[in-house]
Image: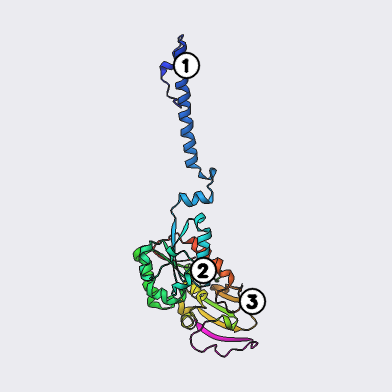
Amino acid sequence: MINFGLSESNFVLRLPTIPAVVVRLLCFTLGVLRVCVGLCVQVECSFPSMFPLSAQDMATSSSTQRIGVVGYGHLGQYLVERILKDGAALGLTLAFVWNRNSDKLRGLVPDELILGDLSSFADRRCDVIIEVCHPQIVKEFGFHFLSQSHFMVGSPSALSDPDLNQKLHHAAQQHGRTLYIPSGALWGGQDIQRLNDSGALTALFIRMSKHPSCFRLTGDVLSDWTEGEGRRVLFRGSVAELCPLAPNNVNTMAAAAVAAGTLGFAGVRGEIVSDTALSDYHVVEVEVTGPSGFSVHTVRRNPARLGAVTGSATYNSFWNSLLVCKGHGGRVYLC
């Protein structure tokens, strides 16, 4: 029974004076208003979907994530521009940008966001730090990054070093941070991870084919290529062996090796192919094998300019990975 603040005496039948009637009507009205306001507050709290928030309201109603970007190559520039342009509406703000040559940032990044000394990154109080420059940065700073924030590794080929891999896994668990591995150009990475986690993944092979100008290899493996020579297999073997040979080109394979944790970098097989016919795109082929004849073969054509290490579709993939970095506990997470 709803009590509108009226006592039994309110209902005694007698001939009231006019002032008494007015007072009682006012009390009744105030009681009804009090109940209605309470109901409105309860409905809004219980059914928030009935009162949708705008993007700006969402950004202000939730805590803003501070993002640090390490590296200002093509991918780093893209991420910085997206955060500056679209970040506020998504609850993201730029904490700092670091580049090996800080002069490259002048006039392109606000001065207050330029970090001159990467060792002082902790002063910027980041929620997520993104590395998009070179595996050496992962080796030198990965542990320190994880002690202060979540860490998205744009160069997961660094994790082919088993000691570094174990060290970063331990740091994530120790500090309750997440080591994020972006899928990049890998298609079906989450499916590979689910198959692996169920114990049903038996083999994984990845082939990456690009125009020779798109490779950045150590040594003289591809120093003698000529236009029009066609297709040439540069390497075929374990991803563990391949990562040091092409650290900037096989991050897609490295992400697959992380997804296929039971096989690891030594168990996942990879092949890189130089093909002068591929002037407009990169090709990534993935062959997944499971029990009882199960297999999946995917082919992804990623548009890319001549000489580009990263295909154009990978940029947006990295951005979508960043939006997932909300904290998943002390673990490694493929995003």
Tell whether 147 sits left or right of 312: left
Tell me whether circle 2 and circle 1 mark residues in contact (CB < 8 Å): no
Q: CA distance from mark 1 to mark 3?
A: 84 Å
Q: Nearer the viewer, residue 157 or 290?
A: 157
Q: Name which of mark 2 and mark 3 comes first in the sequence.
A: 2
Q: Is residue 173 magenta?
A: no
Tell whether 290 sits left or right of 134: right
- Amino acid type, residue under disc 3 in the picture: Asp
Q: Is residue 96 above or below residue 52?
A: below
Q: Name which of mark 1 and mark 3 comes first in the sequence.
A: 1
Which residue is label 1 attached to?
A: 22
Find numbered disc 2 in the image and state the secondary structure of the residue it sits on: helix
Q: Position of residue 135 (x, y in %)?
A: 44, 76
Which residue is label 2 attached to?
A: 77
Which residue is label 3 attached to?
A: 280
Q: Which mark is residue 202?
A: none
Q: Residue at x 52, y 82 (%)?
A: 216
Q: Classify residue 20 by image quadrant.
A: top left
Q: Nearer the viewer, residue 31 or 12?
A: 31
At label 3, counting other C-alpha atoms closer than 10 Å, the crowd grade (few under 14, some 14-19, many 20 or more) is some
Q: CA distance from mark 2 to mark 3?
A: 22 Å
The segment highlighted magenta reads 216-238
Q: Nearer the viewer, residue 314 or 333?
A: 314
Q: Please indicate, yes or no, whether residue 252 appears anywhere in the rendered image.
A: yes
Q: Classify residue 210 by image quadrant.
A: bottom right
